């Protein structure tokens, strides 16, 4: 379907999370056709745009300048300038300040159009082997203030939980998850779509030991099995439930769904 770039429209454009081949044809057309591109980091985005042979004016839009930048971009949109919003990698608004400009555009009756594409959280979720029919995305946990209260809120969350984490905090976060949740089935996905992509599955304890033995690097997504409300299922011997009496890993992908949904 042919798409004409519309004046005064904010386009929220997804970009690759690592593999540049993941850019969509529609994203390329929109980025080539808009008047202005607002990027989280213009240096990072310039590499992608040069790869795509796109030369457009760039302005930075990130957490430390959003208060000033939002009114500027809204004014440009109101005068008929078309703007594409991109982040360093993936879909804008997922753990970056895109919310404020989208909210501002809506408040000013400016049309917002999504150009969907890559997302690290979805790539990790669909390859995790954990239930994906219902999940909750929590982004980054608070580093200090509010961290324990957030973990407490999630203790009895029955949906699959997805988190982002930095490599230098991964082992600390796994320690905190084990203390807050007890043993759970968990997946750590690292460097999704990139050359050194790695997906580590197991219990919190076994995955933690893996990354204690080798320093994690790159962007990390943590996918955690939801709370199982059935009495005594996790408390008796969670490791045996996940791996079996003989130590072999067993799959319980369907156990969080009612029997007729399996």
Image (spheres, rainbow, N blue to C red):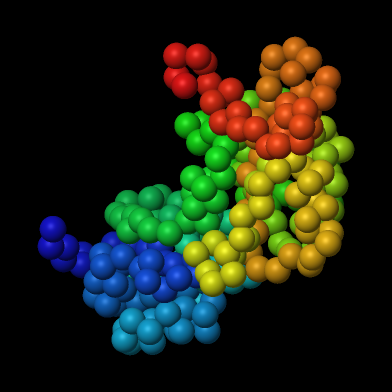
Observer-nearest of 21 and 150: 21
Residue at x-position 16% and y-position 66% = 4
The quarter of the picture where residue 26 lies is bottom left
Asked if residue 257 is positioned above or below residue 115 in the image, the reply reads: above
Q: Position of residue 41 (x, y in %)?
A: 54, 77
Q: Position of residue 91 (x, y in %)?
A: 46, 59
Q: Quadrant of the N terminus?
A: bottom left
Observer-nearest of 141 and 181: 181
Observer-nearest of 51 and 101: 51
User: Is residue 138 in sight in this rendering?
Assistant: no
Q: Give the residue furthest to the left.
A: 2
Q: Is residue 230 left or right of residue 19?
A: right
Residue at x-position 71% and y-position 37% = 248
Q: Position of residue 129 (x, y in %)?
A: 55, 40
The quarter of the picture where residue 223 lies is top right
Residue at x-position 61% and y-position 60% = 198
Asked if residue 12 is positioned above or below residue 121 in the image, the reply reads: below
Q: Position of residue 138 (x, y in %)?
A: 63, 44
């Amino acid at each position: 379907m042919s798409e004409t770039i519309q004046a005064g429209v904010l386009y929220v454009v997804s970009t690759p999370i690592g593999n540049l081949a993941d850019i969509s044809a529609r994203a390329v057309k929109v980025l080539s056709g808009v008047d202005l591109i607002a990027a989280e980091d213009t240096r990072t985005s310039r590499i992608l745009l040069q790869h795509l042979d796109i030369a457009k004016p760039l302005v930075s839009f990130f957490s430390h300048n959003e208060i000033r930048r939002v009114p500027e971009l809204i004014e440009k949109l109101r005068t008929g300038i078309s703007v594409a919003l991109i982040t360093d990698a993936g879909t804008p608004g997922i753990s970056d300040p895109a919310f404020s400009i989208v909210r501002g555009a809506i408040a000013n009756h400016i049309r917002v159009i999504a150009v969907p594409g890559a997302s690290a959280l979805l790539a990790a979720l669909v390859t995790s082997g954990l239930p994906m029919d219902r999940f909750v995305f929590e982004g980054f946990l608070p580093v200090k203030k509010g961290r324990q209260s957030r973990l407490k809120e999630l203790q009895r969350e029955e949906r699959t939980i997805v988190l982002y984490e930095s490599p230098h905090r991964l082992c600390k976060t796994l320690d905190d998850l084990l203390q807050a949740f007890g043993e759970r089935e968990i997946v750590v996905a690292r460097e999704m779509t990139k050359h050194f992509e790695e997906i580590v599955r197991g219990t919190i304890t076994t995955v933690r030991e893996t990354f204690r033995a080798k320093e994690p690097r790159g962007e990390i997504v943590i996918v955690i099995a939801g709370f199982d409300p059935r009495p005594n299922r996790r408390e008796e011997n969670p490791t045996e439930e996940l791996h079996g009496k003989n130590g072999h890993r067993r799959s319980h992908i369907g156990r969080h769904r009612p029997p007729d949904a399996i």
